[in-house]
Image (tube, rainbow, N blue to C red):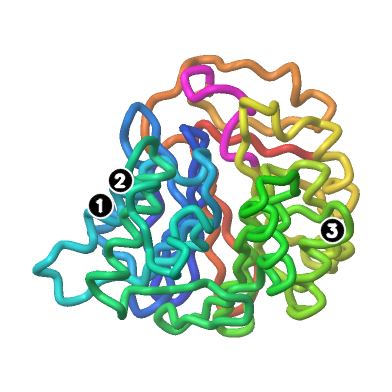
């Protein structure tokens, strides 16, 4: 399955994965690009390969939270588009952990440089923030960034959730950090795309906080399901069934076997289908043929034949000014129905 041609009269959303992680790439009219999180497959960054395919440079790069399944290869993206001689760097967004600051508030790169792709991603962003202040994006709730003709709204975490997560992090105490991750709304010409990151609802916060401030999150046209479609991420952002079906997409997470049929059943009680970028299994066990399956048969699907390589595990949604969205499913994708 080939990647579709770009349209300059529509918003286009690509959801990529699984590999090690997931990634969302948004193209807005006027040639603006945003990359949210990163994933790799066979050692190669999927978002970077997609950008290279379209000969594109991003104006926004966002790491929604410091987990490997979102940070894998993110430092490579930062390095590729922030060369010293480049006149235009993208804005780089993260919510750094307290461990990356010293007692007097200065950034301390040593903890971020010691090991691992998550630490490398944080270090890459912090060094660019120091090198060029205009690249800094704090991703505070309520901030708005232009993306061509579109606007990107940071809808989480709330100040209270952000503070609670930092306090727990500093004290080393147990906390549901998935309530403090960054979710976004992309708006263009009255159309709305909701990017859920791994933001969860339990125990009554997370999505409740976000939708209290951003009530239009419920009236979205496209939703990248939060936390791989898990039950814990269901909240008021789902809304109720609408006259025109919304496009819902989830990326699987093999290590936690997400999403299961039980996770998707409540979603399918609202919308008639959910598109998965692949099966909830490792990349080598993905299929090279797009399939549609009723939710009860999801667990019985197996790879046959094996995947054919990029682009395969993706879902692309074209959002026009008016009318239904146009969905293109990669060969590894699975459409789950009631």
Q: Name the residue located 47 percent from the left edge and 57 percent from the top edge.
A: 63
Q: Mark 1 = which residue?
A: 52
Q: Secondary structure at mark 1?
A: helix
* Predominant SS of the magenta segment: loop
Q: Are marks 1 and 2 in contact (CB under 8 Å)?
A: yes
Percent x, y of residue 213: 76, 80
Q: Up-down: is 99 above or below 104?
A: above
**Can see residue 248?**
no
Q: Nearer the viewer, residue 109 or 159?
A: 109
Q: Mark 3 = which residue?
A: 235
Percent x, y of residue 8: 39, 74
Percent x, y of residue 241: 87, 62
Residue 310 lies left or right of residue 286; in this view the side is: left
**Can see residue 201?**
yes
Residue 225 lies left or right of residue 83; in this view the side is: right
Q: Nearer the viewer, residue 201 or 121?
A: 121
Q: Mark 2 = which residue?
A: 49
Q: Secondary structure at mark 2?
A: helix
Q: Secondary structure at mark 3?
A: loop
């Amino acid at each position: 399955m080939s990647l579709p041609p770009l349209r300059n009269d529509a918003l286009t959303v690509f959801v990529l994965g699984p590999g090690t992680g997931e990634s969302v790439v948004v193209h807005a009219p006027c040639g603006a690009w945003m990359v949210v999180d990163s994933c790799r497959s066979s050692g190669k960054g999927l978002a970077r390969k997609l950008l290279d395919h379209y000969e594109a440079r991003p104006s926004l790069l966002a790491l929604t939270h410091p987990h490997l399944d979102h940070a894998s290869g993110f430092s490579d993206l930062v390095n590729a588009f922030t060369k010293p001689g480049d006149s235009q760097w993208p804005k780089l967004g993260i919510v750094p952990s307290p461990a990356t600051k010293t007692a007097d508030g200065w950034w301390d790169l040593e903890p971020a440089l010691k090991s691992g792709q998550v630490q490398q991603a944080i270090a890459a962003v912090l060094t660019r923030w120091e090198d060029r202040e205009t690249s800094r994006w704090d991703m505070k709730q309520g901030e708005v960034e232009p993306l061509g003709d579109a606007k990107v709204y940071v809808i989480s975490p709330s100040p209270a959730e952000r503070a609670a997560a930092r306090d727990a992090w500093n004290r080393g105490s147990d906390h549901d950090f998935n309530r403090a991750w960054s979710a976004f709304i992309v708006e263009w010409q009255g159309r709305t795309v909701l990017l859920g990151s791994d933001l969860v609802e339990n125990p009554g916060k997370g999505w409740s906080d976000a939708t209290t401030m951003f009530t239009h999150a419920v009236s979205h046209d496209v939703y990248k399901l939060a936390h791989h479609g898990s039950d814990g991420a269901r909240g008021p952002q789902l809304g109720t069934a609408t006259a025109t079906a919304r496009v819902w997409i989830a990326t699987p997470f093999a290590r936690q076997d997400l999403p299961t049929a039980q996770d998707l059943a409540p979603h399918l009680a609202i919308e008639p289908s959910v598109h998965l970028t692949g099966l909830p299994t490792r990349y080598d066990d993905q299929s090279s043929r797009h399939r549609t399956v009723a939710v009860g048969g999801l667990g019985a699907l197996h790879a046959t034949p094996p995947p054919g390589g990029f682009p395969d595990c993706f879902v692309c949604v074209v959002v026009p000014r008016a009318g239904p969205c146009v969905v293109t499913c990669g060969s590894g994708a699975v459409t789950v129905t009631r």
